[in-house]
Image (cartoon, rainbow, N blue to C red):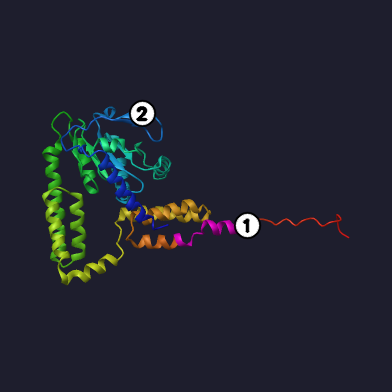
Amino acid sequence: MYTQTKVWAVVGVFVVALLGGLNAAAQPVRVGQQFPDFEGEELLTGKEIALKQFRGKVVLIDFWATWCAPCIREIPNVKKVYSEYHKQGFEIISISLDQSKGVCERFVKLEKMNWHHIYDGEGRLARRYGVRGIPTMYLLGKDGRVVSNTARGRMLETAVRQALAEKGDGPAYAEVEGADQIERQAKADLAAADKLRAAGQYAEAVKKYDEIRLKYMGRPTAKLANERARLIRQNPDLEKELERAKRRPKKLDPEAAKTVQRWRRLADSFAKQENFKMARTYYEKIIDAYPDSKEAAVAKKALQKLPTRAQRRVAREKQEPTSKPAKAGGGEP
C-alpha cells in the first residue's frame, strides 16, 4: 500500500538509532583522511572485493537502502555520473543496509545499477565507519583519501571531475580547492534562496533554505540558511502561504520526471500482464520516492485499482470449471 512511505520512515529512524547505539564510539571518516580498507562479497557475482584494489581510481562509497527515499531520488544522478566518467577511472561501491538481500538484489538488477555492490544487512561496515544515517556518501581521490562527504546532486559530477583531474600523489584536493569549491557552491545556493525571499516567493525560499541546511550540514552557510528559514516560518503573515504551499503538489525536475515516467510505464505494463505484484512494486516506488508530487497521486489511484489477493482468488474460482457428479444408474435413461 502507499502508506508504506510512513513505514519506511519508521524503519529509517530505527536503522539510524541502531547504528548509533551499537557503535557510539565510531567516528565518521573526515575529509582529508585515508578511508580505511574493507572487504566484502560482491552482491551479484559472489566474488570478494576489497577497497585497496581500486587504488589509483576515484571511488564513491555509497551507504544506502531501497527503503530510503532520498537514496532512491539520488540514483538517476549517480547513474548519469557513472556512465559519463567510469571509463575515465570512476568506480562506485554501494553498501546496502537493506534487511533483505533478495530485495536489494532484485532492485539493483531492475534499476541496472551496473557497479559494485556489497550487502551489509547487519550494518557491520556502517558501524565501523560511524555511519549514523543514509544516504551517506564518501568520494575518495586516487590516493584513497576522502575528498568529499557532501557530494550529492549536481555537486557529485563537479567533485568527480575535479578528483579525476588530480595526479593522486599530492594532498587531497578537497583540503584546499575542493573545500573552497563546496563553500562557493553553498554560498551560490544561499544567494539563490535569498533572491526568492526578496521576490516574495517565501515558500520556495524556505524549501531552498531547508535543502541547503541538509546538503551543507555543519557549514556556516547551513546555519545561515536554517536561521533565515526559521524567521520566515515565525512570521504570522506568511503562515497561510506556507500552509498552502505544503498542500500544493511539487513539480519534478526533468531527470526525476523521466525516472517516474519509466517506472509508470513498467507498472502499467505489468498490470496489463496481470503481474500485479510487480505493478504494485513500481507504483509504490513512485509514491515512496516522490510522495508530494502529482505523479504520486496518480500512482496512488492506479494502485487502488489493482485487485487485492482476495479479489484475484475469487476471480480464479469463477474461471475454474465445476465438475458435476455422475448420476446413479450409469447413463441416460
Real-space Cα distance between discs 2 and 1? 49 Å
Q: Amino acid at mark 1?
A: Glu
Q: Residue at x 41, y 60 (%)?
A: 299
Q: Residue at x 13, y 63 (%)?
A: 231
- The tag on residue 317 is 1
Q: Quadrant of the C terminus?
A: bottom right
Q: Quadrant of residue 34?
A: top left
> Height in image: 29 above or below 286?
above
Expressed as whole percent of the image width and height from the top left, the position of residue 319 reads 64, 57
In this rendering, the label closer to the viewer, 2 or 1: 1
Residue with the mark numbered 2: 48
Q: Secondary structure at mark 2?
A: strand
Q: In this rendering, would 79 be left or right of 159?
A: right
Q: Quadrant of residue 123?
A: top left
Identify the magenta region: 303-318
Q: Is residue 311 magenta?
A: yes
Name the one closer to the observer, 10 or 3: 10
Expressed as whole percent of the image width and height from the top left, the position of residue 48 reads 36, 28
Q: In this rendering, would 314 be left or right of 196?
A: right
Expressed as whole percent of the image width and height from the top left, the position of residue 215 reads 20, 50
Name the one closer to the observer, 328 or 261: 328
Residue 134 in sight from this viewpoint:
no
Q: Amino acid at mark 2?
A: Glu
> Height in image: 200 above or below 267?
below
Name the one closer to the observer, 111 or 67: 67
Q: Secondary structure at mark 1?
A: helix
